[in-house]
């Protein structure tokens, strides 16, 4: 284990406690730096193992940790989208989920601005599919959580700034949905933390940590400002979504998750929940109420690591008893409006056939928790 690991974990523990106190909207101190170079052919899906000997790369030229500057953005994205009426941008909330509705703008118009926004905030764009309206950042560390003391400055001066680490990494999946009113913008957070692998505290491993809805709201608010809204208006929008409305848990009945939402609202919320629980949307058909999904690469690449929920379900059988290969499991999430403002959710195999009861129970339970 490299020498900084224990320091990183101690720092992270104290800093997380300090940051857990209530904050005003758009007041978080963020300074993200990506672990991935801007150009890479095989970047890791999970943060690099901090147990690797640091001596192998400590004299590399700067580039292992990068933050894209505004100058790196495409010229077309250099200026904000022209929005004359601030009322055209609105933040909405359901449970712990938030999203933006940008009125009278198509996803294609927002795409270059959105890409520049994440680059300006220190993230590297790892995957993007404008046709599906899906973008994903690589893992990045919020360096603002580190103390800005003399030792850190000295280490950074000699190229050893990475010795200081928060022991946390964040990444975001961004999704755009065209609607008759405009475009809905969703940011979904996923986090990892470095923890000791055993009681001897000689090795560390990375494991998933809880989703941070308030961090999602913070960045959505900042994106509102990137679109032209002034800071005070953006703060008001975020503040209005802080109070969490009471909502009973959606029931699972006969292999279906019964959502107390109409189809439109259920479609929005389920799409965001899929991102949060580690399922990648590969295609969707709103007219048929179908999301086509598969586990994120990090969920299947390291089945022995902690917290790989979908990898733990890799070996399952469909209702006809045939085993499904665990290498590339794919599923269909089907939504069907039941009337009276309710929608039923069912998870199927990629051909639309039922799955085993054990798999369905576990998978729907995961979605049920996220949709609360």
Image (tube, rainbow, N blue to C red):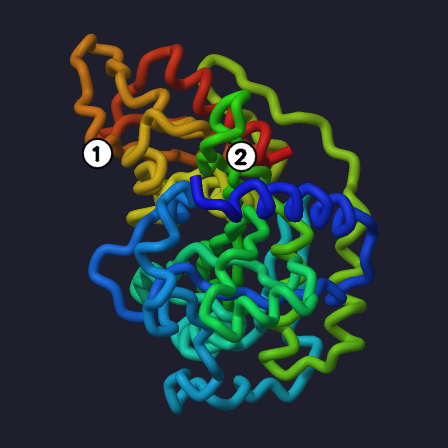
For the point 59% across and 38% down, the residue is: 210
Numbered disc in front, either 1 or 2: 2
> Separation of disc 1 and disc 2 at Cα?
29 Å
The residue indicated by pointer 1 is 328
In this view, the residue in front, 174 or 250, is 174
In this view, the residue in front, 130 or 266, is 130
Percent coordinates x, y for residue 270 in the rendering: 50, 41
Q: Is residue 354 left or right of residue 209?
A: left
Percent coordinates x, y for residue 92 in the rendering: 67, 57
Disc 2 secondary structure class = strand
Q: Is residue 168 left or right of residue 283?
A: right
Work out whether 347 lies above or below 36: above
Q: Earlier along the polypeptide chain: callout 1 or callout 2?
A: 2
The residue indicated by pointer 2 is 195
Work out whether 196 lies above or below 212: above
In the image, farthest residue toward the top: 321
Q: Is residue 289 visible?
A: no
Q: Is residue 295 visible?
A: yes
């Amino acid at each position: 284990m490299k020498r900084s690991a224990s320091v990183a974990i101690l720092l992270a523990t104290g800093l997380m406690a300090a940051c857990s106190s209530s904050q005003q909207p758009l007041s978080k101190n963020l300074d993200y730096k990506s672990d991935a170079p801007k150009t890479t052919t095989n970047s890791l899906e999970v943060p690099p193992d901090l147990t690797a000997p640091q001596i192998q790369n400590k004299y590399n030229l700067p580039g292992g940790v990068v933050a894209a500057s505004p100058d790196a953005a495409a010229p077309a994205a250099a200026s904000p989208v022209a929005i004359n009426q601030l009322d055209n941008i609105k933040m909405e909330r359901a449970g712990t989920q938030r999203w933006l509705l940008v009125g009278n703008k198509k996803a294609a118009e927002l795409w270059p601005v959105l890409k520049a926004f994440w680059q300006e905030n220190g993230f590297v764009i790892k995957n993007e599919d404008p046709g599906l309206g899906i973008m994903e950042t690589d893992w990045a560390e919020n360096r603002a959580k580190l103390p800005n003391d003399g030792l850190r400055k000295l280490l950074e001066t000699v190229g050893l700034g990475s010795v200081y680490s928060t022991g946390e990494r964040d990444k975001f999946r961004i999704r755009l949905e065209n609607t008759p009113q405009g475009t809905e913008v969703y940011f979904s957070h996923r986090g990892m933390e470095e923890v000791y692998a055993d009681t001897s505290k000689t090795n560390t491993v990375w494991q998933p940590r809880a989703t941070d809805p308030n961090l999602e709201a913070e960045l959505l608010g900042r994106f509102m400002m990137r679109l032209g809204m002034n800071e005070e208006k953006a703060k008001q929008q975020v503040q209005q979504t802080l109070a969490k409305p009471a909502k009973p848990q959606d029931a699972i009945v006969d292999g279906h998750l019964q959502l107390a939402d109409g189809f439109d609202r259920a479609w929005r919320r389920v799409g965001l929940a899929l991102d949060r629980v580690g399922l990648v949307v590969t295609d969707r058909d709103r007219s048929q109420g179908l999301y086509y999904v598969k586990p994120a690469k990090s969920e299947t690449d390291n089945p022995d690591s902690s917290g790989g929920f979908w990898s733990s379900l890799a070996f399952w059988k469909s209702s006809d008893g045939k085993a499904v290969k665990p290498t590339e499991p794919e599923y269909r999430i089907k939504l069907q409006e039941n009337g009276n403002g309710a929608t039923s959710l069912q998870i199927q195999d990629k051909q639309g056939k039922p799955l085993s009861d054990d798999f369905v129970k576990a998978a729907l339970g995961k979605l049920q928790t996220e949709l609360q």
